[in-house]
Image (cartoon, rainbow, N blue to C red):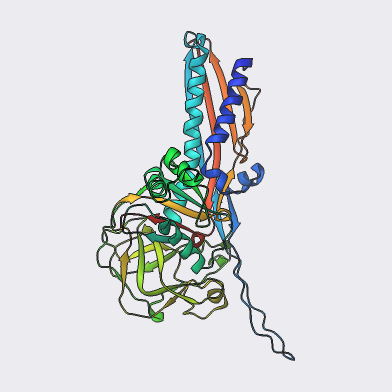
């Protein structure tokens, strides 16, 4: 049976410590621990609740109040990432202990990057608050626009984070270094010496990423949607749906399928507004006077596509619509789309911590079947499993590092993207 040497155990502890340090994005999201038995029985999917939005009424003394139907919405979260790195070392290579450590460090770096990338991808593709800036990154006002759109729509003002790709982050640091530069000014010196803009910017904790996704220039042309109530392009939230067989299942209310006059050139990730559709403050339901921003999730066919968030305009007048209303509509037979990602650029993402969840998973790997196993857990609850097996026919040792996890955005309307050069 293979066993780990003392040196290999120390190396694994070093890998785990470095792995912990590299999980930049995962430290800024909510962690939801999962139960292995439950996840196995549920096909590795669990439904997580979305934030409630309460409704109030005026009390008339002497009269009974009216009970409202509060709809609890939820979203599916899946342990969908099973990342592995496998490498071999022969009996000659194992004479050099540094060789083994270097491969372990590289594996740790890539697996940590996979976790950060998964979180960043969810934030980039599903955040629906869109701020498009005409110029390059370089002003405090650019970040303040993210705070503005979040405040206007009632996003709670605690636990807010913003992550920049390196090019845009350094653009903001360059402006800070130039405009406030003076000896003894900590923010100015940090910006000049280390390209650091500081943790707190316009109410956000700021992070710098060494990688990041890019959004392509919108290729959609003139696209219109009928926003009249009769066209049924508004959405009514429901917690569950009953099939013809009588089976009741949960409903994911983050998305809506809409009908438009054409979907030519439209792709997932595109950001847009709709003429006559304004955002509301989601608690007070007051019209913000600003166009509601949407994202394309997928294109179904030539006239239908899936968007987020749904158009919850209360045109149907139900309790659920009143509770989760996110926009007001000036009805039109042909309301035009306005594309916001005019040019290709790098994503910058902002979010409220509880609205993105990281779900650590666990493998039930036997340790008594000829393979040596080491386990370790990061501060975020991610379990790292290292395996080792020796083949005496080839004189090669095979090493594996594995992580199992999932990530989910529970509230797309409390997360968004900042796009420069638009």
As drawn, is 5 to the left or to the right of 220?
right
Q: Position of residue 387 (x, y in %)?
A: 57, 24
As drawn, is 422 to the left or to the right of 63?
left
**Above or below, 249 relative to 6:** below
Q: Quadrant of residue 278?
A: bottom left
- Residue drawn at (32%, 79%) of the image: 333
The answer to whether residue 371 is visible is no
Q: Quadrant of residue 259?
A: bottom left
Number of callouts: 0
Q: Nearer the viewer, residue 66 or 348?
A: 348
**Above or below, 343 relative to 189:** below
Indicate the quadrant containing the C terminus: top left, top right, bottom left or bottom right: bottom left
- Residue drawn at (45%, 52%) of the image: 349
The answer to whether residue 418 is visible is yes
Give the residue at the far bottom of this rendering.
Answer: 62
Q: Position of residue 313 (x, y in %)?
A: 46, 75
Q: Nearer the viewer, residue 274 or 145?
A: 145
Indicate the quadrant containing the N terminus: top left, top right, bottom left or bottom right: top right
Q: Position of residue 85 (x, y in %)?
A: 48, 29
**Above or below, 35 relative to 338:** above
């Amino acid at each position: 049976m293979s066993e780990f040497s003392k040196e290999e155990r120390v190396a694994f502890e070093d890998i785990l410590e470095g792995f912990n340090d590299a999980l930049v994005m995962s430290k800024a999201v909510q962690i939801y621990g999962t139960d292995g038995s439950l996840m196995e029985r549920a096909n590795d999917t669990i439904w997580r609740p979305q934030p409630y939005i309460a409704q109030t009424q005026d009390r008339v003394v002497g009269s009974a109040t009216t009970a409202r139907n509060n709809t609890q919405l939820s979203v599916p979260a899946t342990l969908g990432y099973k990342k592995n790195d496998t490498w071999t070392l022969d009996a000659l290579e194992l004479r050099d202990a540094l060789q083994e450590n270097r491969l372990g460090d590289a594996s740790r770096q890539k697996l940590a990057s996979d976790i950060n990338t998964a979180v960043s991808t969810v934030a980039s593709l599903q955040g629906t608050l869109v701020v498009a800036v005409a110029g390059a990154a370089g002003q405090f006002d650019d970040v303040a626009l993210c705070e503005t759109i979040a405040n206007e729509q009632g996003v709670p003002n605690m636990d807010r984070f913003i992550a920049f790709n390196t090019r845009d982050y350094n653009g903001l640091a360059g402006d800070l270094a130039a405009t406030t530069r003076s000896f003894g000014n900590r923010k100015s010196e940090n910006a000049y010496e280390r390209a650091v803009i500081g943790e707190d910017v316009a109410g956000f904790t700021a992070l710098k990423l060494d990688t990041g996704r890019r959004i392509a220039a919108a290729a959609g042309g003139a696209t219109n949607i009928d926003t009249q109530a009769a066209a049924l392009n508004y959405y009514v939230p429901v917690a569950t749906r009953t099939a013809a067989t009588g089976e009741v299942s949960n409903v994911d209310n983050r998305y809506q399928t809409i009908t438009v006059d054409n979907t030519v050139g439209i792709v997932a990730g595109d950001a847009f507004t709709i003429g006559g559709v304004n955002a509301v403050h989601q608690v007070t339901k007051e019209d913000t006077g600003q166009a509601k921003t949407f994202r394309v999730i997928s294109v179904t066919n030539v006239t239908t596509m899936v968007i987020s968030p749904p158009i919850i305009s209360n045109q149907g007048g139900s309790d659920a619509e009143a509770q989760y209303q996110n926009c007001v509509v000036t009805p039109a037979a042909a309301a035009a789309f306005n594309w916001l990602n005019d040019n290709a650029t790098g994503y910058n993402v902002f979010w409220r911590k509880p609205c993105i969840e990281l779900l650590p998973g666990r493998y039930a790997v036997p340790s008594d079947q000829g393979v040596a196993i080491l386990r370790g857990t990061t501060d975020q609850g991610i379990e790292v499993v290292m395996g080792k097996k020796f083949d005496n026919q080839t004189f090669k040792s095979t090493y594996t590092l594995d992580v199992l996890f999932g990530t989910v955005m529970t509230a797309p309307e409390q997360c968004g993207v900042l796009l420069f050069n638009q």
